[in-house]
Amino acid sequence: MTQVRTRIAPSPTGDPHVGTAYIALFNRCFARQHGGKFILRIEDTDQMRSTAQSEHDILSSLQWLGLEWDEGPGVGGDFGPYRQSERSAIYAEHIATLLESGNAFHCFCSAERLDEVRKTQMAAKQQPGYDGHCAHLSKAEVDTKLAASEDYVIRMRVPETGNCEFHDMLRGEVSIAWSQIDMQVLMKSDGLPTYHFANVVDDHLMEITHVVRGEEWINSVPKHVLLYKYFDWTPPIFCHMPLLRNPDKSKLSKRKNPTSINYYRDMGYLPEALINYLGMMGWTMPNGQEVFTLSEMEDAFDISRVSLGGPVFDTEKLDWLNGKYLREAGSDKDFQERLLAWAQDSGRLAPIIPLLRQRVEKFSDVAPLISYFFSGSVAITPESFSHCKLAPADACKALQFALWKLEALSVWSREEVESTLMTLSQALDIKVRDFLAPLFVAISGQPVSLSVIDSIAVIGLDLSRARLRAAIEVLGGISKKQAKNLEKEFAQLG
RNA sequence: GUCCCCUUCGUCUAGAGGCCUAGGACACCUGGUUUUCAUCCAGGCAACAGGGGUUCGAAACCCCUAGGGGACGCCA
């Protein structure tokens, strides 16, 4: 019997997401349970959005959670490179095969034309998709266009009739009509592969036996099995996990919930508690045990015990669980060490020392001044803002705009935070002092504190976002309608 | 809109046709312990989406309806 090999394939385009950790956990447990290997592959084929920072954060947060990989970046292995941006030659070679066999074709359509087509189809209430415009160009026509160096992509051919039937480990037989499947782009005009193509090629070459991933992929399985067929490869076994949900049951998203693993780390959750909690999303130990370690989960793992209803990622139970670990696991000494490590390693202490020194006369003055750096939320009421010059509605707007600006920062530094907020206060034509007043309250819970700009820089986007949102709520919140108007106004600010 | 997936307490879930008067955990409520609070302990509230079948027997199997979610990109 061949060795089980599973993988997690994150795309380094943002914060390390708890959903990534969730899927990584199940992949790892499945592999370990079968004495197999768990592989990490970086899917950085989106040149525009992939960043080294994001890749670094994702890798280190998986490590923080204890989800180390057997093969992948930093570890090596016999199937590398494990970064798709370093595998271009492989994709070029494989796309040539498909072009030769006629299973893929050049497409010279412009983005504008495709938009147009899609719009027309939508208006006619048809299934949106590529209309096959370039599917039947003659070899001569293609050569002429290539010689004229026209931009092109490469698309796959798809059967027009019949159904694609495949097996899912958890859901059994699934059938999707080929007519539902678009002539997917495999190679983009920048010469890089799309997810669908790179994913299939890499999973095959890396000898992945089981693809365990989120339910969101289930509709693209036909594209993938078709590619396996075109290459005459055996497809892996598919297993689609339920998606983590917001309390309103929609797919877990940072707009509605903290989704960054960094947020949970900064809030002072223990990695083993977070892992334990993720392990109870859609899964239970055969003996019903609720508190368990990663290695206990790996030993007892049984993928057929996954339940398919999308679990709500609701932090109440996580809080209880984390408290239980804090109270019951380890000695008082361990607790002390972990607490100190958390405060120090979070990078929050060192940068505030210079600010702090100017304001204290004795060490005993320190604790009240810095408590908000080490808090999750700060206690505020509408009255906390009563000294602000801005009316509550304007303060709301200022806070929301500030949040959006901060979220858009590509580099997180004191200087960036400062210039962003200064520019924003000018754009809004509000005195800096008045503009910053509600921010002081939102971030520190007090009208006066250490520099709010430094504070934001130090506590980071995740915690800042949580506090700004909380403050907006306290000030009366923003309705959906208002949000739309604000978005418009914000866009005009430039 | 089209297609696909899903549906047990508010939330996470147990449940593989009779062991189900549907079990556990979180949250909530009540009581006990505790100088307060928290912890801890004991108890309580609370669910099989609806309708049809199949079967001696359905939370479980099948069908329909409803509800929820996802996908429909030169993003992954």
Image: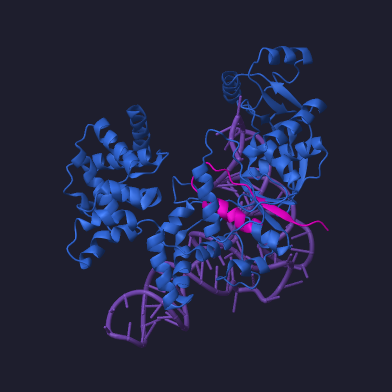
Chain colours: A blue, B purple
Asked whether A314 or A156 is in front, the reply is: A156
Quadrant where the N terminus of chain A is found in the figure:
bottom right
Looking at the picture, how far across and down is residue A238, in whole percent?
72, 49
Q: Position of residue A263 (x, y in %)?
A: 43, 54
Q: Is residue A160 visible?
A: no
Does residue A199 show up?
yes
Q: Position of residue A84 (x, y in %)?
A: 64, 40
> Quadrant of the rendered structure where residue A480 is?
top left
Q: How many marks?
A: 0
Which residue is more in the foreground, A224 or A77? A77
Relative placement, left or right, of B4 versus A333 is: right
Relative image position of residue A437 (x, y in whole percent): 21, 45
Residue A29 drawn above or below residue A323: above
Q: Which residues are magenta?
A: A1-27
Q: Residue at x 73, y 21 (%)?
A: A135
A42 or B20: nearer the viewer: A42
Image point (70%, 13%), residue name? A147
Q: Residue at the location (24% across, 63% down)?
A: A366
Q: Where A99 falls versus A3 (above or below)?
A: above
Q: Is residue A213 left or right of residue A437?
A: right
Q: Is residue B42 above or below residue A415?
A: below
Residue visible at 42% across and 39% down? A410
Direction from residue A6 to residue A474 in the image, left or right: left
User: Which quarter of the rendered picture does the C terminus of chain A lie within?
Assistant: top left
Residue A276 in the magenta stretch? The answer is no
Q: Is residue A10 magenta?
A: yes
